[in-house]
């Protein structure tokens, strides 16, 4: 990950300085911004490999910045927020963020999540998988449904590709979390529920009545081909 460019956005000078120092110490090339407008300008002039973005900013909010960045940039976005409300986290994910860390957070946790989203955003050199009307190109990290592109964040793509590699199999919460996010997340079932909900909104005709991504109560999830049901 050494030399990867990270754009850090936070309006609190103390936190911004701490993040700059820590990320530079970890080998990243760091750009810093204190407002959403400044972040958008920096991202346009020197496109980053990843963005660490505070949710609450003067002017444009982190959600608004995520939404604007996603209109032209695919670099992963990690949200920082003191807001514990699930609705705020879901809004940020829906706007295009890939992960979130709630303040106060440990630096090791942030670095681990940043490494994870950067790994998931890279090419995989793997084949194309077809599940019903879904086509998952693992090499290009692209998904289409009925020939139309489906825009997924790196985390959502990582989750869908894991399901697709295991089509038809019942996958437990623990197995999914370990495979997609790592052993440190094995017990974070709520974390998984948020991402499954986001993914269903993008691949299901009716997310409330899923045909692809099925819940096995008390056990886990299963990706199936609805044309074979």
Image (tube, rainbow, N blue to C red):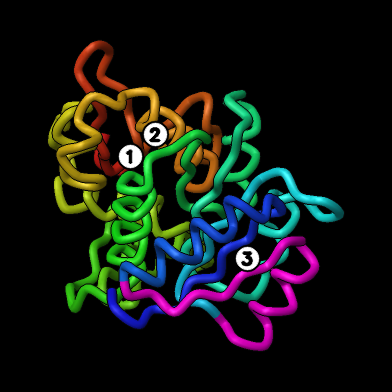
Residue underneath mark 3: 70
Q: Residue at x 27, y 60 (%)?
A: 130
Q: Nearer the viewer, mark 3 or mark 2?
A: 3
Where is residue 225 shown, x and y percent of the image? 28, 43
The numbered mark at residue 141 is: none
How far apart marks 1 and 3 lie (CA) works out to 30 Å
Q: Is residue 183 magenta?
A: no
For marks 1 and 3, the one nearer the N-term is 3
Q: Nearer the viewer, residue 67 or 210?
A: 67
Q: Residue at x 24, y 70 (%)?
A: 128
Left or right placement of residue 37 versus residue 175 in this view: right
Q: Residue at x 22, y 73 (%)?
A: 124
Vertically, is 177 above or below 163? above
Marks 1 & 3, CB-CB < 8 Å contact: no
Vertically, is 38 above or below 17? below
Residue underneath mark 1: 226
For marks 3 and 2, the one nearer the N-term is 3
For marks 2 and 1, the one nearer the N-term is 2
Q: Quadrant of residue 117?
A: bottom left
Marks 2 & 1, CB-CB < 8 Å contact: yes
Q: Secondary structure at mark 1?
A: helix
Q: Is residue 46 magenta?
A: yes
Which segment is the magenta one? 27-47
Vertically, is 197 above or below 67? above
- Residue 101 visible in image: yes
How far apart marks 3 and 2 lie (CA) works out to 28 Å
Vertically, is 126 above or below 9? below
Residue underneath mark 2: 211
Q: Nearer the viewer, residue 25 or 183?
A: 25
The N terminus, quarter of image: bottom left
Q: Secondary structure at mark 2?
A: loop
């Amino acid at each position: 990950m050494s030399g990867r460019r990270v754009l850090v956005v936070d309006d609190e000078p103390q936190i911004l300085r701490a993040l700059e120092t820590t990320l530079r110490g970890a080998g990243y090339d760091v750009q810093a911004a204190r407002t959403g407008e400044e972040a958008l300008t920096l991202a346009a002039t020197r496109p980053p490999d990843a963005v660490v973005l505070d949710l609450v900013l003067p002017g444009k909010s982190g959600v608004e910045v995520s939404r604007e960045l996603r209109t032209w940039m695919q670099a992963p976005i990690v949200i920082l927020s003191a807001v514990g409300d699930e609705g705020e986290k879901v809004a940020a994910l829906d706007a295009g963020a890939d992960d979130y860390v709630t303040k106060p957070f440990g630096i090791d946790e942030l670095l681990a999540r940043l490494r994870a989203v950067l790994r998931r955003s890279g090419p995989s050199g793997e084949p194309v998988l077809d599940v019903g009307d879904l086509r998952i190109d693992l090499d290009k990290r692209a998904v289409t449904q009925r020939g139309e592109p489906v825009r997924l964040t790196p985390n959502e793509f990582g989750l869908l590709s894991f399901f697709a590699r295991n089509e038809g199999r019942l996958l437990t919460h623990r197995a999914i979390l370990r495979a997609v996010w790592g052993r440190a997340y094995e017990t974070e079932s709520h974390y998984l529920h948020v991402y499954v909900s986001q993914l269903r909104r993008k691949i299901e005709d009716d997310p409330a009545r899923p045909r692809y991504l099925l819940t096995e109560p008390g056990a886990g999830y299963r990706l199936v081909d609805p044309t074979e049901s």
